Image (cartoon, rainbow, N blue to C red):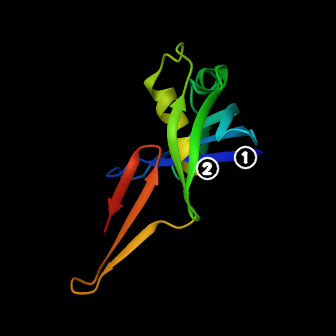
Amino acid sequence: YNYLYQAAALVDGVADTPSFDLTCSVLVSTSESACQAQFQVTECELKESDGKTDNKVKHSEDLSRDLSKYPFFVDYCVATENETKITELHVSASEGSTTVLNLKRGIVSALLLPALPQIHHDESAHVMHVVQNDIFGSCPTK
């Protein structure tokens, strides 16, 4: 499977609200015999935007090279009809950057999110509790 991954990060509190946009191609290969997927990231581009123009970031090629250098693997299981649980992330021992590792975790989280999060209603407080499970664990919200 070939995906186009796009992520954006806004810098809050600044008048012009600059943002960073990352776009990558991600090839995901699966095996029918094992619950494991291989991810290969390619063709990444990092841009900075001031709301008017987009400019390629100086070290965009370096980041693309670092993200593309090593494939990574994810072990998963189907926990319920609507939830895929990630059991382990396998990266190369040579993976040197925490930034690259965190971006790869973000890619996995975006592509393997369950179709429906766990939703619990608290009628007395008029609050909805949502629990989203991803590569970082269980993330409760209100």
Residue drawn at the location 61% of the way across and 31% of the way down:
73
The picture quadrant where one finds residue 136 is: top left
Residue that appears at 38% across and 52% down: 138
Res. 21 visible in picture: no
Residue under the point 35% across and 50% down: 14
Q: Secondary structure at mark 1?
A: strand
Q: Is residue 22 above or below residue 114?
A: above
Q: Earlier in the sequence, mark 1 or mark 2?
A: 1
Above/below status of 33 relative to 114: above
x, y percent for residue 127:
29, 78
> For the point 36% across and 75% down, which residue is it?
120
SS label for mark 2 = helix
Q: Which residue extends farthest front?
A: 33
In the rendered structure, which amino acid carries the disc numbered 1? Tyr
Assess whether mark 2 and mark 1 are in contact (beta carbons under 8 angstroms).
Answer: yes
Residue 121, percent from left and from top: 33, 80
Tell me if mark 2 has few (under 14), some (14-19) or many (20+) residues whose alpha carbon lies within 10 angstroms of its own: few
Look at mark 2 in the image and give the residue it sits on.
111
- Residue holding disc 1: 3
Of the 4 image quadrants, the one containing the N terminus is top right
Depth order, front residue of 65/36: 36
Q: Is residue 65 visible?
A: yes
Q: Quadrant of residue 32?
A: top right
Task: Say above or below: 23 vs 93.
Answer: below
Which amino acid type corresponds to the residue marked 2 in the rendered image? Leu
* x then y, percent, for residue 113: 55, 55
Q: Residue furthest left?
A: 124
